[in-house]
Amino acid sequence: MLSRTADHLFWMARYMERAENTARLLDVNYQTSLLPQSAEAVAQAWQGLLSISELTTDYFKLHQEVVAKDVIDFMVSEARNPSSILSCLRAARENARAVRGALTTEVWETMNQTWLEFNRLIKDGALARDPAELFEWVKFRSHLSRGVTLGTMLQDEAFHFQRIGTFLERADNTARLLDVKFHARNTEFFGSGLDNETKEVDFYHWSAVLRSVSGFEVYRKVYRNVIRPEKVAELLILRPDMPRSLLACMNEVVSNLQSVAHDHSDETLRRAGRLRADLQYGRIEEIMATGLHAYLTQFLDRVSDLGYGISRDFLMPA
């Protein structure tokens, strides 16, 4: 496969996943902002959302202070924000158009219709009427895109590059979400001395985090007890059967990299396998003991390095 074609397929899938992840992050912040808390805490949560996406500088080029409505507009419909849902869906559609011949008709029509329908919804004021409903729509369209790809694409190199892009982006986002949300609560465990009101707020906070990765029902099925921060971390880092966990993502990345590997990709495949092995044989007690923030920061650095390696070995030169 031409590196140009692989590049478009990789970034098409990655931008679609990024749009979904942005919608998930916005949704959890929107839901938690409705909980009883101080105005300062709400502002810090929206500031944290900008930090997750490394968009604080870009945001303050357009706005004077952190206001919920401005952050939502900036992350959803601001064309000058390269990571907004609008920009991601446009980039996904343009990459799909560039390799129209490598896609099935169903995949192309899903991408194209998503872009056109999203623009119509924004113009009709759907974001102002009900942000949560629009976020659910974006997530649904991303699910539809992946489902159509799985259901209609030949599982050749084109398919594998899309899967690599999807799961590399998902791993990056899950790590960022965990890092910021643990920092926001300023705790890694429920302390026995917490009062009932604090415990209640913590419950809703972690419930919202789990719901943002479609993990609330999964958590209840796996652990069957009160929601504990260290168990949330374990579920989203080390569980291979949790679709959005770091280990599940790296299992997919390694599997699909092996399917497209060539003579010059040994080092990239080795690094991916090493990262997967560290997760596969890791223990949440060890991670918590050494510091979750340090662990996740290192993971993000390694994922970024892996992305550069994939670009170097398979895609268009950066």
Image (spheres, rainbow, N blue to C red):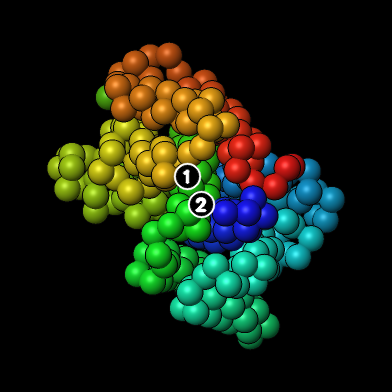
From the viewer's perspective, tell me whether residue 241 is left or right of residue 202. left
Q: Is residue 59 visible?
A: yes
Q: How many marks?
A: 2
Q: Which mark is residue 161?
A: 2
69 and 178: which is toward the camera: 178
Q: Residue at (42%, 53%) from the top-left corner? A: 212
Of the pair 175 and 33, the residue shown nearer to us: 175
Q: Nearer the viewer, mark 2 or mark 1?
A: 1
Q: Residues within 10 Å of mark 1 (few under 14, many from 20)?
A: some
Q: First in sequence: mark 2 or mark 1?
A: 2
Q: Give the residue at mark 1.
A: 260
Residue that appears at 51% across and 28% down: 266
Q: Residues within 10 Å of mark 2 (few under 14, many from 20)?
A: many
Residue 210 placement (x, y as % from top left): 35, 48
Residue 44: which quarter of the image? Answer: top right
Disc 1 residue type (three-letter) = Val
Mark drawn on residue 85: none
Image location (x, y in percent) of residue 190: 32, 29
Label 2 with label 1: CB-CB less than 8 Å: yes
The part of the image, by quadrant, that contains residue 198 is top left
